[in-house]
Image (tube, rainbow, N blue to C red):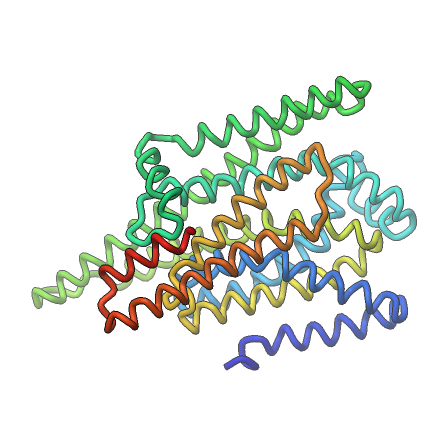
Amino acid sequence: MLLKTFGWSFAVTALGLVAAVFYGGWQAFGIVAILSVLEISLSFDNAVINAGILKKMNAFWQKIFLTVGVLIAVFGMRLVFPVVIVAISAQLGPIEAIDLSFNDPDRYKELVTDAHPSIAAFGGMFLLMIFLDFIFEDRDIQWLRWIERPLAKLGKVDMLSVCVALIVLLVSAMTFATHAHQHGGGHADKASTVMLSGIAGLITYLVVGGLSGFFENKLEEEEEREQEAEEEAKKAGKPVSGVLLAGKAAFFMFLYLEVLDASFSFDGVIGAFAITNEIVLMALGLGIGAMYVRSLTVYLVRQGTLDDYVYLEHGAHYAIGALSVILLVTIQYEINELITGSVGVILIGWSFWSSVRRNKAIEAAGGEGGGSDSKAEVTSGV
C-alpha cells in the first residue's frame, strides 16, 4: 500500500536529485533536498485539507487529481508561477522573464520580492476565507470548544466571514501604506495593489468554492432521492443524469483543489528564494515536495485517517488560519520560514494527539463515546 501510493514520489525524488547533481554538483543536490523538505513541512496541512475534499470524489477523479493535478501543481505553480509573477510585475514577456531567471538570478529575485505583497495578499485572503468559513460553522465534533462554540454562534450572522476578511485586508493595506509613507513612500503606490490582489483572492474563493459547494449539494440531494426510491422499491432514479451531475460536482471540487494548492504553494515559492535564486533547482526541490503532498493526500483518503483521527481536519484548518495571518504579515515584515513551517506541524501534531486521546477515552468507556467524547473534546483544548 505504501509503495503503491508513494511509488511515483520516490521515483521523482530519485530523478530530481540525480538531475540536480548533473546540473550543479553536490551543492545543487543539497539545495534540492532542503527545498523538498521545506515544501513538505509547509504543505502538510495542505494534504490534510485536500484529503477531506478528495474523499468525496470517485476513483476516476482521484486519478485525475494525481495526474493532471500533479502537472498543474509541479509545473504550473512551482515552475511557471515564479516566471509569470516576474513577467507581470516587471512588465516583461514570458521569454524575457525566463531568460532573466537563468542569466540574472539576482535581478530575478529582486523582482519576485517586489511582487511579494500582492502575492501574499491574494494567497492570504484565499486561505483566510477557508479558515473563517470552517471556524464559523456549527459542527457536531468540536476540538477547542472554548473557541469554536462561541464562534459557531457568531457564524449564524450572514456573510460574517466575508466582512471579517475584508476588515483584515483593509487593516493590512492601511498598515502597508502607512509604513511606506513613513519610510519615504517607496511602496505607497503598491497599497492599492495589495487591496486589489486581496479582493481578487476573496472573489476567487467565493466563485470556485461557491460552484463546488453548489454542485456538491445537488449531488447529495440526488443521492438521497435515489436512496429513498430504492428503499421504497420504486424506480432507481436516473443514473445517466446522476453520473453527469457527479462529473460537474467533481470538476468544480477539482478546480477548488487546484486553487487551494496554488494558495498553499505561495509561501513555499517565496520561501525558496531565501535558499536559492536558481529557478531550475527551485522547480526540482518544490516539485519533489509537491509530489509527496499529493501522495500523502491519497494515503490519508485510502487509509481513512481523517475518520479515525477526527481532530486532524480541525488542526489543519487552524494551520491554514495561522498561515493566512503569516502571509498577510509578510506583506510588511519578514518572517523566518522555520516559523512558517513549524506552526502548521505543531497545530496538526497537537490535533493528532488530541484525536488519539479521544479514541482512548471512547475505548476505555467500552466504545460508547457520548460522555467520553464530550470530555475528550473539552480537555483537548487545555
Residue name at image x 66 percent, y 48 percent: 267
Residue 358 lies, in percent from the top left, at: 35, 64
Which residue is outermost to the right? Answer: 103
Instruction: Classify residue 125 by image quadrant.
Output: top right
Is 235 on the left or on the right of 84, as rendered? left
| Total labels drawn | 0
Toward the viewer: 164 or 24? Answer: 164
Residue name at image x 76 percent, y 63 percent: 34
Toward the viewer: 149 or 378? Answer: 378
Residue 281 lies, in percent from the top left, at: 80, 61
Is 183 on the left or on the right of 223, as rendered? right
Is 109 on the left or on the right of 351, as rendered? right
Instruction: Classify residue 198 by image quadrant.
Output: top right
**In the image, residue 112 above or below residue 255:** above
Residue 140 lies, in percent from the top left, at: 28, 52
Instruction: Classify residue 172 by image quadrant.
Output: top right
**In the image, residue 230 above or below residue 338:** below
Residue name at image x 58 percent, y 75 percent: 6
**In the image, residue 109 above or below residue 182:** below
